[in-house]
């Protein structure tokens, strides 16, 4: 459908499909139907809902968590990959900064430990997404 209605086909056939549709009976029928359906029936009441959502936030949260649980359960390779990347990252940062936090001589040592922690968290976060 996209090949048939593309701009190159308009040029090839020397016609504008938008103008052709606006002048067609199909467009007029659709406009008439929209006007007809937008008029409310006699003795009808406006739609009124007691809540904005079908369920409260707790039920929606449980539904989303259950769906996410099913998604993760169906892809064990994905889960294994993330667990392995987390373990590998933890080992790399653990080896790099082994006993470094025990000896804090100045502010730079403390900032370097905080930077390593920040880098570890962002790396794991990047691997999970």
Image (spheres, helix red, strand yellow):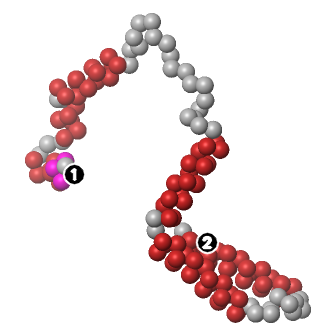
Q: Position of residue 26 (x, y in %)?
A: 19, 28
Lateral position of residue 57 relative to residue 2, left or right: right
For residue 125, the mark is: 2
Residue shown at 38% from the left, 14% from the top: 39
Q: Position of residue 70 (x, y in %)?
A: 50, 59
Q: Secondary structure at mark 1?
A: loop
Question: In this figure, which residue is indicated by the disc labeled 1?
Answer: 2
Lateral position of residue 87 relative to residue 18, left or right: right
Tell me where residue 118 sits by quadrant.
bottom right
Question: Does residue 33 appear in this view?
Answer: yes
SS assignment for the magenta stretch, majority: loop
Question: Does residue 6 appear in this view?
Answer: no
Q: Label 2: how many residues lie within 10 Å, few (<14), some (14-19) or many (20+)?
A: few
Lateral position of residue 112 relative to residue 69, left or right: right
Viewer-side label of 1, 2: 2
Residue shown at 80% from the left, 93% from the top: 99
Nearer-the-camera pick, 20 or 26? 26
Q: In the image, is residue 11 above or below residue 17?
A: below
Residue shown at 56% from the left, 71% from the top: 128
Residue shown at 65% from the left, 44% from the top: 58
Q: Label 1: how many residues lie within 10 Å, few (<14), some (14-19) or many (20+)?
A: few
Q: What range of the chain is rendered magenta?
A: 2-6
Q: In the image, is residue 80 above or below residue 16?
A: below
In what quadrant of the picture does the C terminus appear? bottom right
Q: Position of residue 97 (x, y in %)?
A: 74, 91
Q: Secondary structure at mark 2?
A: helix
Nearer-the-camera pick, 43 or 62? 62
Q: Position of residue 87 (x, y in %)?
A: 62, 83
- State the CA–CA distance, disc 1 to disc 2: 39 Å
């Amino acid at each position: 459908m996209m090949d048939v209605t593309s701009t190159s086909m308009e040029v090839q056939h020397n016609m504008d499909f938008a103008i052709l549709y606006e002048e067609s009976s199909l467009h007029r029928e659709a406009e008439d139907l929209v006007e007809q359906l937008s008029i409310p029936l006699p003795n009808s009441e406006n739609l009124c809902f007691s809540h904005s959502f079908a369920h409260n936030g707790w039920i929606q949260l449980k539904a989303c968590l259950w769906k996410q649980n099913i998604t993760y359960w169906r892809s064990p390779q994905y889960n294994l990959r993330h667990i392995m990347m987390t373990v590998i990252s933890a080992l790399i940062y653990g080896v790099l900064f082994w006993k470094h936090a025990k000896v804090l001589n100045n502010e730079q040592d403390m900032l370097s430990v905080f930077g390593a922690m920040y880098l570890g968290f962002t790396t794991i976060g990047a691997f999970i997404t």
